[in-house]
Image (cartoon, rainbow, N blue to C red):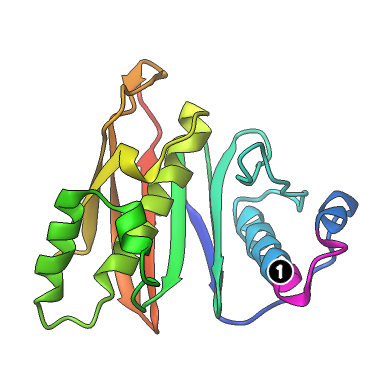
Amino acid sequence: MPAAVAAVDTFEDHEVELFPEEEELVAKSVDKRRKEFTTGRYCARVALGRLGLPPSPVLPGPRREPTWPAGVVGSITHCKGYRAAVVGRTADVWTLGIDAEPNEPTPEGVLGAVSLPPEREMIAELARGADKVAWDRLLFSAKETVYKAWFPLARTWLGFEDAEVAINPDDGTFTARILIEPPVVDGVPLDGFTGRWLAREGFVVTAIAVPALTT
């Protein structure tokens, strides 16, 4: 992440006193869901603190996306054994997206459901290499990250089939080309993203950070 972005991650669950609005969301949840939610909010609060901001509730929006204090953008991810949050000020960052997944093949049928034919060809070619990366899972993670970066700007749904991702195995980057008519946000067509990825500690992690627009 760029220096202007506060990033916090953890491989362990953390207890934090939830705000009443947050507690209401998980009051009847199973233990697994509660730990995911609580530790995600722990990461978010620490990250917000690094921006000099006080703790505040981070509630889900209409598409379950986290809503942030005014002047802040961010993203949260969680999977078994890993939680993370990133935040930045809108003066520095236009949008953020992160996703983490286990570095394991996707369940049967998932790749076909989330990928386009050119992407499946790419995954097959990447799989012929010696790297121990679950490329299909990495593709899934990248598409999740694209959506997380897209929705706060476009405020519209983006399906798996609506973006084509190309993974560069050599430099840890990926690009996403939006295949639907791109909305114009702040005078700029929202037609694609560039992100970074890594495979480490048993996980694949993808991230997008778009610098704030300058006039």
- Residue 64 appears in view: yes
Q: Neighbour class for label 1 at 10 Å: few (<14), some, many (≥20)?
A: few
Q: Secondary structure at mark 1?
A: helix
**Residue 34 in magenta?**
yes
- Where 135 sits versus 66, above or below? below
Dominant secondary structure of the residues highlighted in magenta in the image: helix
x, y percent for residue 141: 38, 60
Quadrant of the frame with the C terminus: top left
**Percent from the top left, x then y, of residue 99?**
45, 60
Which quadrant of the structure image shows residue 140? bottom left
In this rendered view, identify the residue nearer to me: 200 or 147: 147
Q: Say if residue 4 shows up in the picture.
A: no
Residue at image mark 1: 33
- Left or right, residue 21 beside residue 45: right
Region in magenta: 26-35
User: What type is the residue that disc 1 sits on?
Assistant: Arg
Does 25 sit above or below residue 28? above
Give the x, y percent position of residue 57.
77, 49
**Which of the two residues, 110 or 5, is positioned nearer the viewer here?**
110
Name the residue nearer the viewer: 122 or 88.
122
Query: Horizontal placement of 47 versus 129: left or right?
Result: right
